[in-house]
Image: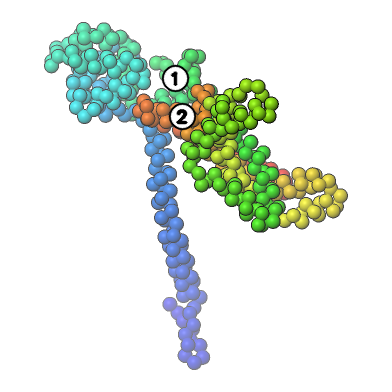
């Protein structure tokens, strides 16, 4: 390192020394920034990234049979699906079926095979109860116990459960299935369910979003233009739903909208209807309750953007001869695009995952994807199907967000 001696004996750092000190200071600044961000990043990884990654893995996981019956899974994968498997496959299956009683292995295998056909669990139990300790010909022995073991379709179901990964759940979530020859086709008409469920979920979420936008935009505009004292008082009423439990609010709507509830009694008293209207346990009740719950999430982003828009732009447009409505629509509204985008995407994404409100105030034809995710998780313990439905909903949400984001950016570029 070289230095320069100044008058009076002082030593000034050279250019190279200054650069090294600057680099050291920059590294220190970056380390401090990383140290501040690290706890939040770790929190997001633990509570967000890891669960989503686990869900994606569960949607294609097929390891139950391979974990309990590894020799059977390895052997049957060599079978071409025609006729019956080899004697070695029969022997490995009989041996591992006998050992599967310990540790709950038989239950997990039966549950997985029941996804292929509902009769597998009973077939396994009957076979296990009649299984002899030894046999010279396991093929004949198993067929004697139950003729189903002599059918190729029985072993084809086991073969479908043998690979460690499967697309069965993802295909089933789209009302598709893979045939024995590997081709993908739609399931029978009477078994189609989930495409209609996803469509219903999008319609309900989109409808709630549009209603919240129609109600929230003028409310946010009013809050942004009123004097601060009045605006703050009204904002308390906007935030009031946050202070009440979701279950309490949903139950309150059931009480208000039921046949002898306040809403119907008021309509009858005013002479608007003669008989009570069906306002609950249908799509109408779902919209009422969800809009009430999600409206603040639309108002707050709009209000935060509108509060920063100067009223002088509108006044200038009017002073130049524009009609007040034209000035509002062409000058004021384009400046609120970011707030509209934030509010609509927030409300839409939150509405997609709603479960409690549609389950309580909706009817059978109003249940969304989250209802079936909860059903497969809590009732049938079919984690693969629940994860597949959640994964597809996540993919659809991300796709819609990307499309929406691109459209909003293009609109902003055109407007500028």
Report the colour scheme: rainbow
- The residue lying at 55 percent from left, 47 percent from top is 240
Residue 341, visible in the rendered structure: yes
Can residue 90 be seen in this snapshot?
A: no
| Front position in the image: 117 or 223 | 223
Residue 336 to residue 193: above or below: below
Above or below, 45 against 87 in this view is below
Is residue 134 found left or right of 248 in the rendered image? left
Relative horizontal placement of residue 304, taking residue 373 as reference (left or right):
right
Q: Is residue 210 above or below residue 337?
A: above
Label at residue 38: none
Q: Position of residue 188 (x, y in %)?
A: 48, 14
Give left or right: position of 1 versus 410: left
Give the residue drawn at x 21%, y 9%: 145
Which residue is label 2 attached to? 371
Disc 1 and disc 2: Cα gap in Å?
22 Å
- Mark 1 or mark 2: name the one nearer the start of the chain: 1
238 or 341, nearer to the observer? 238
Across and down, in percent, residue 221 comes to 69, 48
Q: Residue furthest right?
A: 321
Q: Quadrant of residue 83?
A: top left
Q: Position of residue 173 (x, y in %)?
A: 46, 25
Residue density around tag 2, few if under 14, some if 14–19, many if 20 or more, within 10 Å: some
199 vs 167, nearest the viewer: 199
């Amino acid at each position: 390192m070289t230095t320069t001696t100044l008058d009076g004996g002082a030593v000034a750092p050279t250019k190279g020394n200054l650069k090294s000190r600057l680099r050291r200071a920059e590294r220190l600044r970056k380390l401090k920034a990383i140290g501040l961000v690290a706890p939040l990043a770790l929190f997001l990884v633990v509570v967000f990234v890891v669960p989503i990654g686990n869900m994606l893995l569960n949607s294609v996981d097929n390891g139950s049979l391979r974990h309990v019956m590894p020799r059977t899974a390895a052997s049957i994968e060599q079978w071409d699906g025609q006729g019956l498997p080899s004697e070695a496959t029969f022997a490995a299956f009989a041996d591992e079926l006998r050992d599967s009683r310990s540790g709950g292995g038989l239950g997990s295998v039966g549950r997985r095979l029941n996804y292929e056909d509902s009769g597998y669990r009973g077939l396994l139990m009957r076979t296990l109860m009649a299984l002899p300790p030894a046999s010279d010909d396991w093929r004949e022995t198993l067929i004697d116990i139950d003729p189903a073991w002599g059918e190729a379709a029985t072993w084809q179901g086991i073969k479908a459960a043998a690979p460690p990964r499967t697309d069965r759940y993802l295909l089933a979530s789209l009302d598709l299935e893979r045939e024995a020859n590997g081709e993908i086709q739609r399931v029978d008409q009477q078994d189609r369910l989930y495409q209609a469920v996803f469509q219903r979920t999008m319609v309900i979420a989109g409808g709630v979003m549009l209603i919240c936008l129609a109600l929230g935009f003028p409310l946010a505009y009013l809050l942004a233009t009123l004097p601060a004292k009045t605006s703050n008082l009204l904002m308390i009423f906007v935030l009031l739903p946050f202070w009440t439990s979701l279950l309490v609010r949903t139950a309150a709507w059931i009480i208000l909208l039921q046949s002898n509830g306040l809403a119907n009694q008021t309509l009858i008293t005013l002479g608007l209807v003669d008989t009570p209207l069906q306002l609950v346990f249908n799509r109408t009740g779902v919209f009422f309750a969800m809009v009430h719950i999600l409206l603040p999430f639309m108002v707050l982003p709009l209000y935060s953007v509108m509060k920063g828009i100067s009223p002088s732009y509108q006044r200038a447009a009017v002073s130049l001869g524009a009609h007040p409505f034209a000035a509002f629509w062409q000058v004021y509204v384009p400046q609120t695009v970011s707030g509209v985008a934030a509010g609509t995407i927030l409300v839409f994404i939150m509405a997609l995952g709603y479960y409690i409100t549609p389950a309580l105030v909706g009817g059978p034809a109003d249940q969304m994807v989250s209802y079936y995710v909860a059903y497969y998780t809590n009732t049938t313990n079919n984690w693969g199907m629940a994860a597949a439905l959640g994964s597809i909903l996540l993919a659809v949400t991300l796709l819609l967000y990307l499309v929406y984001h691109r459209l909003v950016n293009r609109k902003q570029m055109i407007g500028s």
